[in-house]
Image (spheres, grey):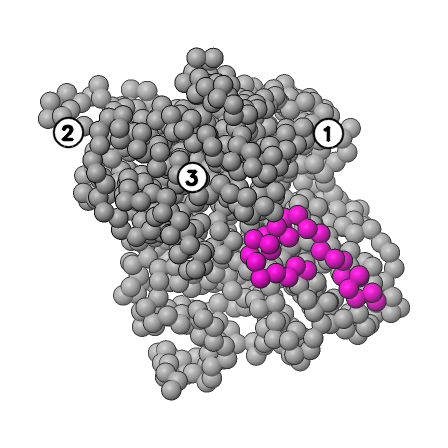
Amino acid sequence: MTKIVCVPGYQIVEEIHRSSRTLIYRGIRESDLYPVTIELVRNPVPTNKELMQIRHKYDVGKDLDLPYIIKTLALEPYQNSYALILEDCDSISLASYLHQRGALGSQTQTLITFLQIAIQIAQGLEGLYIQRVIHKDIKPANILIHPVTQQIKLIDFSLASRLPKETQEIKNANMLVGTLAYMSPEQTGRMNRGIDYRSDFYALGVTCYELLTGQLPFISDDPMDLVHCHLAQQPVPVRHIKPNTPLMISEIVSKLMAKNAEDRYQNPLGLKYDLEICLAQLQATGKIGLFVLGENDPSDRFLIPEKLYGREPEVATLLNAFERVSKGMTEILLVAGGSGIGKTLVIQEIHKPIVRQRGYFIKGKYDQFQRNIPFSAFVQAFRDLMEQLLSESDAQLQTWKNQILAAVGENGQVLIDVIPELEHVIGKQPPAIELSGSAAQQRFNLLFQKFVRLFTTAAHPLVLFLDDLQWADLASLDLLKSLMYDAGYLLVLGAYRDNEVSPIHPAILAIDEIEKNGIPVNTIILKPLSLEDLNELVADTLHCDLLLAEPLTELIDVKTKGNPFFTTQFLKTLYEDGLITFVRSSQQGSVGGWICDLTQIKSLVVTDDVVEFMALQLQRLPSGTQWAITGAACIGTEFDLHTLAIVLEQSPERTASELWSGLEANLLIPTTETYNFFTRSTIGQSPHFVNESVPSKTANPVYRFLHDRVQQAAYSLVPDDQKQLAHLKIGNLIYQNSSEIVRAERLFDIVGQLNLAKELITDPIDKQRI
């Protein structure tokens, strides 16, 4: 029996769609008889994530009053959730349209239909581009088409982003947000690229491919196989599947689906221009002649390419190391160099072969302000691995549970104490026999060794990345030594600042000992970019010839000494200061280009200290954002919203609002999707319902600084005579606002903060408590 739905103020006409997550009805708004579509969450007791997504659809959609975007009318209270009210344009999804009609094929009339559809979608993306919204889930199911007029509307903004760029963290393929078959390489989290508006172009390319051929470019039931295809496989061109397809249409689809965003269209206008050429020629002559794609594709948004420059030999060394490990070796590869030289970016180039080999990549980072926390990077890495396991199928999870229990026996609690997420995999474990001193340490190391061996096999080699080894604690280094023996299929990647370690540094001594025991250790030392490589970066940024870029490159080289991080931040500052600008051409058929004011750039007085430089950039942010970021810098390289709110003694909503400018400036990176619940346009503006406070109390976004140097710069803004006072306040506030369970979980965080303020702690009782 169908449940009767009653949304006050609306008359339900019929159910038009039912999925595992949503129910969609056609209805009428009673106040003016306006036809509407009503979307409900199907779950009678919706999760916070489901509430957040429908709220987010409303919050993004209400600001998009555009011709090719579905109109978002209201968000109404409905039982334990919301009813999202949209216009009813009497359309069906493009997926249904495709299912009814089949592939549009390569006949003249159907090609005209395809081009008319594609042009409208490009116009929809143009609207999003102007509004600075990334859809992140373009696919036939999220595109409506009127069966008669063929009017197009883009729908479903549940995953949309209003940041200029997002960074996707590595997740199990089953946990990626979006639709894997249409997902751009950068959205998989396994590519050295951020997600920006050009990700939507890739998804549109897949959609066009399906419209023309009736099939997806990559077909597999294995999620990791699909990820690998998006990263490394070239799709069979449309023209090879449908030979009568005009070459230029096939080439447009291929350009949209380029692996690197820099090789796709750079502007929806450029795409629309090329599609309109095809349509005009086809309607006039029935044929499409050859022409150069992208001739009218203005790159009018300042984007610094994220590809690596001048690191080909180092990347080759890295990939060769993984090749050896995937055949059974155990190896350590160290990447050394100064801060901002690009160590992490080089290491992340290893993702493609890891996906191909079905390997696991996990990473942890040591923090200069939390060196007292034992195993901190190992804990981060293996907590991440447990999250990946938990997203696998029930059968696979049961297999992992059996294998882990067989390996650790009755000592599972020893590992759970360090990696709490492990309990979700193997269940509650009996208390372990208490040991003290070296005996406890030896037991832990032996157990961890057995545990790690489960994940180092031919079926799935393990790559463990330990970042900022110069700040590693002694317990971590001892554990690393114990892990390297008799493992096989294990590659440990370590990055460290070679200017901050000496031959007698504990990390160097530990690596030396590992090497003496027969484990291969290789080291890559990264140098600053050569003038030639730097010039290529500048030319690609400004979309100009290498020769034309040389004067600016020489100035930048003097200022930044070829440091990649410093270079990109300096270029960004020149743009923000109006010293690099885009000038549109007044000539017919010319799109314009980027120019720079060399005279003013020459006269700039810029410090060659990157921390001092970044501190100056932070001081340009609103005062509330500066206050929030300096508080975050005292916590660590990564922090969660609720902890920062406690530290700042204000609400999470206000704290998130103050962080937003830091996110827009790409100085802070959200690492969880829940940040979307706290955007500048949502805070304080949404309707207040009975359950309004539930998501905001439980949703706790996590953020990290773009780079260590940004955190250092933010920390430097705290006056030296106030730093200890700040750490004392943070330690006490976290302690006072935490339950006993949370205190136990955050023991090292609390003590670490108080230790940094130990000179201010004089009360004997307080000292004893610490």
Residue at the disc numbered 3: 452
Q: Nearer the viewer, residue 247 or 560?
A: 247
Q: Earlier in the sequence, mark 3 or mark 1?
A: 3
Residue type highlighted by circle 2: Arg
Where in the figure is residue 192, as x and y percent of width and height? Answer: 58, 40
Magenta part of the chain: 217-244
User: Residue 668: which disc?
Assistant: none
Q: Residues within 10 Å of mark 2 (few under 14, many from 20)?
A: few
Asked if residue 242 lies in the magenta stretch, the reply is: yes
Element assignment for label 1: helix
Residue at the disc numbered 2: 769
Q: Earlier in the sequence, mark 2 or mark 3?
A: 3
Where in the figure is residue 415, as x and y percent of width and height? Answer: 32, 40
Residue at the disc numbered 1: 549
Element assignment for label 2: helix
Residue type highlighted by circle 1: Ala
Element assignment for label 3: helix
Q: Residues within 10 Å of mark 3 (few under 14, many from 20)?
A: some
> Rounded to the nearest whole Å, what is the CA distance between mark 1 and mark 2?
61 Å
Where in the figure is residue 721, as x and y percent of width and height? Answer: 29, 19
Side of 218 relative to 466 (left or right): right
> Does residue 575 sit above or below 238 in this rendering?
above
